[in-house]
Amino acid sequence: IFIRFKNKMSGIDYIQNSIDTNKNEIARIDSGINEMRCRLGDPALNASQKASIEQEISILECNKYSLKATIDQLEMEKDELQGENPNSLLDEKEN
């Protein structure tokens, strides 16, 4: 029972670490997007350069939404693990 409980807790910790890592990556992406948007205001940029920056921003936005979807999935997995009744582990041993 203890081993199953320990494995479950390490699974939750691993999932939480993955969630935190993805959130940090989203923050890094947001920072990059903001920096690129500031660069778009540079009057020295030509139309081609602006289009290239806008394309990079679009790609980063897609990556960000993909990471958000991954976080949602990880949160559901974590909730599933946390939602298991710890007493059911004891019941299994008694049977």
Image (spheres, rainbow, N blue to C red):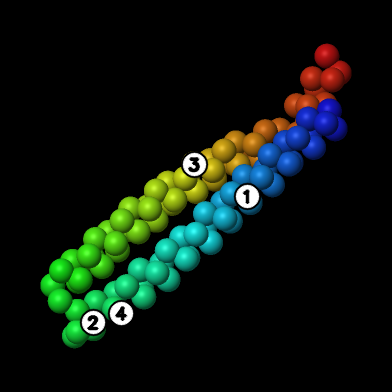
- 4 and 2 marks in contact (CB < 8 Å): yes
Direction bottom: furthest residue: 43
Q: CA distance from mark 2 to mark 1?
A: 38 Å
Type of amino acid under label 2:
Gly
Q: Is residue 37 above or below residue 85?
A: below
Q: Which residue is mark 3?
A: 73
Q: Please, which residue is most extreme toward the top here?
A: 95
Residue 43, x across and y down, in percent: 18, 85
User: Which quadrant of the structure image shows residue 38?
Assistant: bottom left
- State the residue position of label 1: 16
Picture coordinates of residue 95 (x, y %)? 83, 14
Q: Give how far across and how far down residue 12 sits, in percent.
A: 67, 43
Q: Residues within 10 Å of mark 1 (few under 14, many from 20)?
A: some
Q: Is residue 42 left or right of residue 77?
A: left
Q: Residue at x 33, y 53 (%)?
A: 62
Considering only order in the chain, which callout, 1 or 2, is on the residue closer to the N terminus?
A: 1
Q: Determine the CA span between mark 1 and mark 3.
A: 12 Å
- Which of the two discs, 4 and 1, labels the residue nearer the N terminus? 1
Q: How many marks?
A: 4
What secondary structure is marked by label 1? helix
User: In the rendered structure, which amino acid carries the disc numbered 3?
Assistant: Gln
Of the numbered discs 3 and 2, the one sitting upstream in the chain is 2
Query: Splitting the image into 4 quarters, where does residue 88 fall?
Result: top right
For label 2, the residue is 41
| Kind of residue sitting beneath label 1 | Gln
Q: Which mark is residue 38?
A: 4
Q: Position of residue 18 (x, y in %)?
A: 59, 49
* Distance in Å between CA atoms under marks 4 and 1: 33 Å
The span from disc 4 to disc 2 (Cα, nearest Å) is 6 Å
Which SS class for mark 3? helix
